[in-house]
Image (spheres, rainbow, N blue to C red):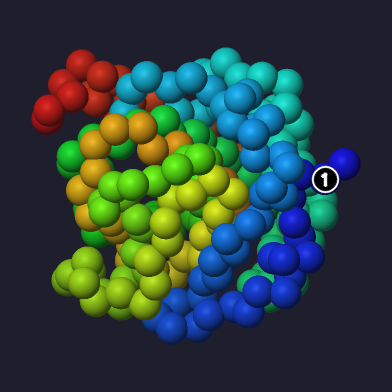
């Protein structure tokens, strides 16, 4: 049985201002959230980690397989009017946020589409809510704000305007990031970068 609601994804209009994005509050079906939450990797450090470096339960593995499956790819091709045939995916997971995270940034040009799926069963902090920004100047100039609540998806097409960021938060903040990227060389390079970044944050957490 599918754990993701592609019907809701397909029915959600694609926003065009300030760049192409959409937010689907219940992308993960409600009856699957608790099982995925239980099987989520136990990540004690800040940073993004390639899944190969993490331990997780069977249900989480099945969920990831569905995210990388042909149905998901077809839905994203249709929504963003892109051909993703032959474009590899890269998936990382986060478990904790530190004060320096969330600064305004844009993804690298090697990423075609970014997908963020949140897995926090409750969220009470004011910070940590990702904002779709109209520029790289201010977090207040935003088109949308996304609460990082379990099952919520934010997806956007990377372009020169796709800035995003969030207000400061510290503590547990679970999010899965999937990217379609240009080629396998990008996957290898990004995995090395994530490993190094996570190591630096673990050794120098206040840096």
Left/right of residue 186 with respect to residue 28 in the rendered view? left
Instruction: Give the image location of residue 193, x and y in percent.
Output: 37, 33
Query: Which quarter of the figure is the N terminus placed in?
Result: top right
Circle count: 1
Q: Nearer the viewer, residue 194 or 24?
A: 24
> Residue 192: in sight, yes or no?
no
Residue 18 percent across, percent down from the top left = 40, 80
The residue wearing badge 1 is: 2
Q: Image check: 45 left or right of 25?
A: left
**Vertical relation: 33 (above or below) 14:** above
Kindly give the residue lying farthest to the bottom in the view shown.
17
| Identity of the residue drawn at 30% across and 58% down | 165
Residue drawn at point x = 52 percent, y = 71 percent: 21
Q: Is residue 133 above or below residue 109?
A: below
Which secondary structure lies at badge 1? Answer: loop
Residue 107 in the image, given as x and y percentages of width and height? 39, 56
């Amino acid at each position: 049985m599918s754990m993701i609601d592609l019907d809701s994804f397909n029915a959600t209009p694609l926003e065009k201002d300030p760049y192409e994005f959409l937010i689907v509050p219940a992308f993960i079906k409600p009856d699957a959230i608790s099982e995925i939450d239980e099987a989520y990797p136990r990540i004690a450090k800040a940073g993004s980690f390639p899944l190969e470096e993490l331990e997780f339960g069977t249900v989480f593995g099945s969920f990831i397989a569905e995210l990388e499956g042909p149905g998901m790819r077809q839905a994203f091709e249709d929504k963003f009017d892109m051909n993703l045939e032959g474009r590899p995916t890269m998936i990382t997971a986060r478990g904790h946020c530190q004060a320096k995270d969330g600064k305004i940034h844009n993804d690298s040009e090697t990423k075609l589409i970014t997908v963020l799926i949140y897995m926090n069963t409750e969220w009470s902090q004011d910070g940590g809510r990702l904002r779709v920004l109209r520029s790289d100047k201010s977090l207040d100039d935003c088109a949308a704000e996304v609460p990082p609540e379990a099952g919520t998806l934010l997806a956007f097409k990377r372009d020169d305007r796709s800035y995003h960021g969030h207000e400061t938060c510290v503590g547990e903040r679970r999010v899965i990031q999937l990217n379609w990227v240009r080629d396998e060389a990008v996957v290898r390079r990004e995995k090395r970068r994530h490993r190094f970044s996570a190591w630096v944050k673990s050794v120098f957490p206040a840096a």
